[in-house]
Structure formats: structure tokens, C-alpha cells
Image: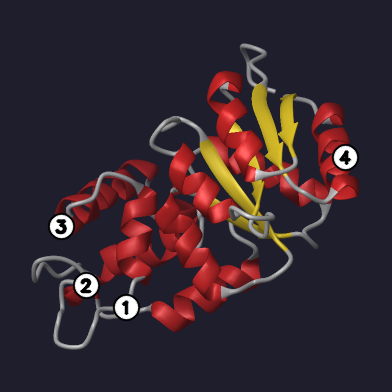
């Protein structure tokens, strides 16, 4: 829990009743978290979540009728300050990219241990984009492309490319600084330059530009 005793407000959108109840118990028992609400389908979540005002929403990808990804795409414009983390039984690369484009900030497979789900929630609030390790590797390996193709012909330096790769896999600023043996201030400066070159304003937008393959003959994506 933070120094001011702030509790992170959490909601859940999950159609599998046992799994939804397990998540509710996990959140209620965790220090620093406050369980707000749970919904069994996207339609109910669309009605209730904007009023519930959670800070983090855990969303199942495979919901009946309207999918979890479509649900997030509709909610994010109405709840821009809320962080959405997808939960899925599958580590499908296309679903990960679709989730990020819809407005999700994290993506975990459902076999993730409960304690790691709690860590991911905390990281989400600290500005990271947590993804299960195998998902992060698959996405980066499958969709990496030269940085010179990312935006309007602007090329990133080798250091900026490395920092962007680490951002794409969910590393926090301090982790990047420690791994590259530079200061957090230097990391922030590099990230500001990356954002300027890619014409983006957030980690998620930068990650999408990094991961999205360019159509043939169109270097701007």
C-alpha cells in the first residue's frame, strides 16, 4: 500500500463464474487493493463500469457475444484514466495486438500465478505494461522491424531502439536504467525523444508503433 494508504480500485469482467470469484477473493485479500465490482459480460460492464470508476479493470478476452477486446475499445474513450488488463487462456499474438490497439495496457494468460497477477496490477499503476513473458517474447520477435520505418522517416538511435524494445516488454524506467547502467533521468530523456520522433504521447502508443508491421510499400505503417 502507498504511503497515503490509497487503495487501488479494481473491477473484473469475466464470464467464468469460478474464475471471477477467485479473482474477487484474490483482490479482496490483497493489501493495497479494493474490490469494486464484477460483471459476467461486456454488455453489463459497459453499463456499470463508467459509474464504478475503477482504476484497473481485469477483462477476459473471450466473453460471450461482445468480446473483451471490443468492450475495452468502447470503454477506454469514456474512461481514459482507467487501466485495462486483459486475461486470456491463450497467448495469441494477434489478440495481444488487438487488445493494445483497443486501449488495454497489459495482457496476462490465465495460468499466471495469483501473486504475479497482483504484481502486474501494481506495475500497471506504476506505468508499466505487464505481459506474460512468453507473450512479450512472441510479440517482439514476430513484429520487430527497423526503427527507421517507424514514423515519418525519423530514425531512432541504437540506445533509443534498445529502450523502446524494453518498453515494449513492460520494463519499468528503473529496470531499464539498471539494465543499461544509466540514470532514470537519462531513461526519461531518451523516452521523451522517442515519443517526439514517433509522434506519440504514451508507452502504449510507442509500443504499438514498434510492434505493428508496415504494409508492403508503406514504410509509415
Q: Is residue 172 above or below residue 100?
A: above
Question: What is the C-alpha distance between the residues marked 4 and 3?
Answer: 44 Å
The residue located at (46%, 82%) in the rendering is: 142
Residue 148, visible in the rendered structure: yes
Reading the image, the residue beneath label 3 is: 197
Residue 21's disc number: 4
Q: Tag 1 or tag 4, which sits nearer the N-term?
A: 4
Reading the image, the residue beneath label 1 is: 213
Numbered disc total: 4
Question: What is the C-alpha distance between the residues marked 2 and 1?
Answer: 7 Å
Q: Point out the residue furthest to the front here.
A: 65
**Disc 2 and disc 3 in contact, CB within 8 angstroms:** no
Question: What is the C-alpha distance between the residues marked 4 and 1?
Answer: 38 Å
**Disc 4 and disc 3 in contact, CB within 8 angstroms:** no
Q: Determine which quarter of the picture holds residue 123.
A: top right
Q: Where is residue 156 drawn, in percent x and y?
A: 19, 67
**Disc 3, SS:** helix
Q: Tag 1 or tag 2, which sits nearer the N-term?
A: 1
Q: Tag 3 or tag 1, which sits nearer the N-term?
A: 3
The residue located at (56%, 22%) in the rendering is: 53
Q: Where is residue 36 drawn, in percent x and y?
A: 71, 23
The residue located at (64%, 47%) in the rendering is: 59
What is the crowding at mark 1: few (fewer than 14 residues within 10 Å), some, or many (at least 20)?
A: some
Task: Classify the position of the C terminus by image quarter.
Answer: bottom left
Question: What is the C-alpha distance between the residues marked 2 and 3?
Answer: 14 Å
Residue 221's disc number: 2
In the drawing, does residue 93 fall left or right of residue 40? left
Residue 129, visible in the rendered structure: no
Question: What is the C-alpha distance between the residues marked 1 and 3?
Answer: 18 Å
Amino acid at each position: 500500500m502507498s504511503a497515503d494508504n490509497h487503495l487501488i480500485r479494481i473491477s473484473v469482467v469475466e464470464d467464468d463464474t469460478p474464475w471471477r470469484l477467485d479473482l474477487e477473493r484474490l483482490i479482496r485479500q490483497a493489501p493495497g487493493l479494493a474490490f469494486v465490482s464484477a460483471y459476467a459480460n461486456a454488455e453489463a460492464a459497459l453499463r456499470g463500469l463508467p459509474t464504478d470508476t475503477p482504476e484497473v479493470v481485469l477483462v477476459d478476452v473471450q466473453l460471450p457475444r461482445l468480446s473483451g477486446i471490443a468492450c475495452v475499445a468502447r470503454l477506454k474513450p469514456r474512461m481514459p484514466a482507467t487501466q485495462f488488463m486483459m486475461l486470456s487462456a491463450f497467448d495469441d499474438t494477434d489478440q495481444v495486438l488487438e487488445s493494445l490497439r483497443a486501449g488495454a495496457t497489459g495482457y496476462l494468460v490465465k495460468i499466471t500465478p495469483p501473486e504475479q497477477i497482483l504484481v502486474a496490477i501494481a506495475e500497471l499503476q506504476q506505468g508499466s505494461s505487464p505481459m506474460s513473458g512468453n507473450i512479450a517474447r512472441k510479440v517482439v520477435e514476430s513484429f520487430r522491424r527497423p526503427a527507421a520505418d517507424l514514423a515519418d522517416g525519423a530514425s531512432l538511435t541504437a540506445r533509443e531502439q534498445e529502450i523502446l524494445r524494453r518498453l515494449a516488454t513492460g520494463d519499468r524506467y528503473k529496470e531499464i536504467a539498471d539494465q543499461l547502467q544509466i540514470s532514470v533521468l537519462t531513461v526519461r530523456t531518451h523516452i521523451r525523444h522517442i515519443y517526439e520522433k514517433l509522434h506519440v504521447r504514451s508507452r502504449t502508443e510507442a509500443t504499438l508503433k514498434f510492434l505493428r508491421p508496415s504494409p508492403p510499400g508503406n514504410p509509415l505503417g
